[in-house]
Image (cartoon, helix red, strand yellow):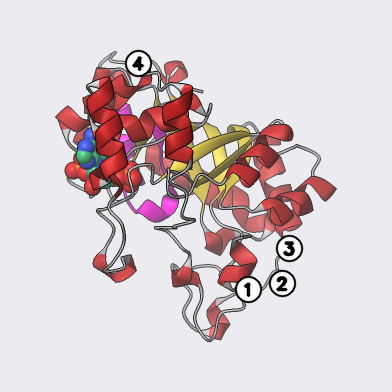
Amino acid sequence: MPIVGLGTWKSKPGEVYQAVLWALEAGYRHIDCAAIYDNEKEVGRAFEEAFSSGLVKREEVFVTSKLWNNSHRFEDVIPALKKTLEDLRLDYLNLYLVHWPIAFKQGVGFARTREEFYTYQDVPLAQTWAGMEEAKAQDLCKHIGMSNFNISKLEEIFKTAKEEPEMNQIELHPYLPQEKLVNFCQSKGMLVTAYSPLGSGDRATSIKKDDEPNLLEAEKIKEIASKYQCTPAQVLIAFSIARNIAVIPKSVNQGRISENLKAAKIQLDGSDMQELLNMDTHYRYIDGSFFTNPYSPYSLEDLWEK
Ligand code: A2P
């Protein structure tokens, strides 16, 4: 799996087609997608163009997508995956992830009322995982894993899994290095992918806090960037790479797409890595609060471990 991939969350229709083609032209061979990003059809058009023009072959590109919360029942997993494959114009995914350990009723985009949520008892995570195993058995995806799972939820999966999960995709950057969770995953032989490596400053204002810290503007990051004569974004990407963690910066700008891939050449030394790890403030840009409201059976304490 190529360690740097292109993120497509927040890439708007009208932008993501071009972004994927620029990325493949620049040398990216890993594209991270999800059904809920609502742009898979356009990403699929870019794949079709890239494959038919001979820019890349299907087997050279590592494609990830994610099962949305409304398809956690065993019988809903394969139809959801087939829809993603149809949209992406692919016949298999390299990696399919359970997007969140949270379940909504079928057809619900974002649950708001009590009726729109399932609970863990209604749809145990093991049931969803069995659906993922079936998807792999049918060769609709080569590898299976999850996103946003904490240690206890991973342990729950390991209890009944016939196919062990291979990936946990989680928010990771110097403000949230999550060393305990990363170590746990790696000790179980799982790979880890960092999302929001640049702090996802382009999130909708409805899910942003006014006072959130700006990673790309942090003094320490700028200082390290000037030492390596690179950009702050490249420091943040190199930070994940040095931890052997795949990283999926999102960009729809040709120059920044190419800049981000070049970060793979930067090797941060041990003392700079320690300084970056010391920036840990447990700050989450994606704190999951959009899944909790007075009617939700889920809580932030249940999602994230201290
Ligand atoms: P853009 O798409 O216009 O390049 P994340 O990957 O953490 O979600 O962050 C994505 C945000 O970071 C987007 O606003 C994206 O803007 C911006 N971004 C991506 N690459 C760079 C870069 N090299 N320098 C500065 N900002 C960047």
Give the image location of residue 220, x and y in percent.
31, 40
**Which range is magenta?**
31-48
Q: Is residue 16 visible?
A: no
Give the image location of residue 292, x and y in percent.
51, 75
Q: Is residue 39 magenta?
A: yes
Sequence-wise, the earlier of marks 4 and 3 is: 3
Question: In the rendered structure, which amino acid carries the disc numbered 4?
Answer: Lys
Q: Nearer the viewer, residue 301 or 20?
A: 301
Question: In the rendered structure, which amino acid carries the disc numbered 3?
Answer: Pro
Q: Where on the picture, by quarter, is residue 185?
A: top right
Name the residue beneath numbered marker 3: 124
Question: In the rendered structure, which amino acid carries the disc numbered 1?
Answer: Tyr
For mark 2, give the secondary structure.
Answer: loop
Give the image location of residue 113, x and y in percent.
50, 84
- As measured in the structure, the alpha-carbon distance from the residue carrying label 4 to the one carrying label 1 is 45 Å
Give the image location of residue 167, x and y in percent.
60, 37
Q: Residue at x 54, y 85 (%)?
A: 295
Name the residue beneath numbered marker 4: 265
Sequence-wise, the earlier of marks 4 and 1 is: 1
> Does the CB distance between marks 1 and 2 fall below 8 Å?
yes
Q: Residues within 10 Å of mark 2 (few under 14, many from 20)?
A: few
Q: Is residue 260 magenta?
A: no
Magenta stretch: dominant SS?
helix
- As measured in the structure, the alpha-carbon distance from the residue carrying label 1 to the one carrying label 3 is 10 Å
Question: In the rendered structure, which amino acid carries the disc numbered 2?
Answer: Asp
For mark 1, give the secondary structure.
Answer: loop
> Does the CB distance between marks 4 and 1 fall below 8 Å?
no
Which of the image's four quarters has the C terminus? bottom right
